[in-house]
Image (cartoon, rainbow, N blue to C red):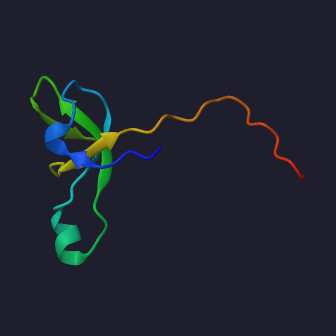
Amino acid sequence: MASEWQPIETAPRDGAALLLACADWPHSTILGKPVPTKVGGWDVDRRQWHIFGGTWKPTHWQPLPEPPTNQPQAAGGGE
């Protein structure tokens, strides 16, 4: 099930990794580029958002998807 983007004000501030986005990023607004999304989280010690590889302030968040498993996939039919 896909998660919906939620306002950043509702994000957990416990240091958990989240998927963050900036809906008012100037390059999206002015140049029409895609809204940036990156993994990050609330830095509990600094009391601010930390975005890995980003310098913008997030406006939205959603939980990270479940990672893939290392279990072998079942063989598909018809091969």
Q: Residue furthest front?
A: 1
What residue is at 18 percent from the left and 62 percent from the top? 25
Q: Is residue 59 above or below residue 44?
A: below
In percent of width and height, residue 53 lies at: 28, 47
Q: Is residue 36 above or below residue 64?
A: below
Q: Residue furthest left?
A: 47
What residue is at 73 percent from the left and 32 percent from the top? 72
Q: Choose between 5 and 54: the one closer to the eye.
A: 5
In percent of width and height, residue 78 lies at: 89, 52
The quarter holding residue 49 reads top left
Q: Residue furthest bottom?
A: 31
Q: Is residue 65 left or right of residue 53?
A: right
Q: Choose between 22 and 50: the one closer to the eye.
A: 22
The quarter holding residue 69 reads top right
Q: Choose between 60 and 44: the one closer to the eye.
A: 60
What residue is at 18 percent from the left and 48 percent from the top? 58
Q: Is residue 37 above or below residue 40?
A: below
The quarter holding residue 44 reads top left
In percent of width and height, residue 61 lies at: 26, 44
What residue is at 17 percent from the left and 38 percent from the top? 10
Q: Residue furthest right?
A: 79
Q: Is residue 54 above or below residue 75?
A: below
In percent of width and height, residue 66 lies at: 48, 34
Total numbered labels:
0
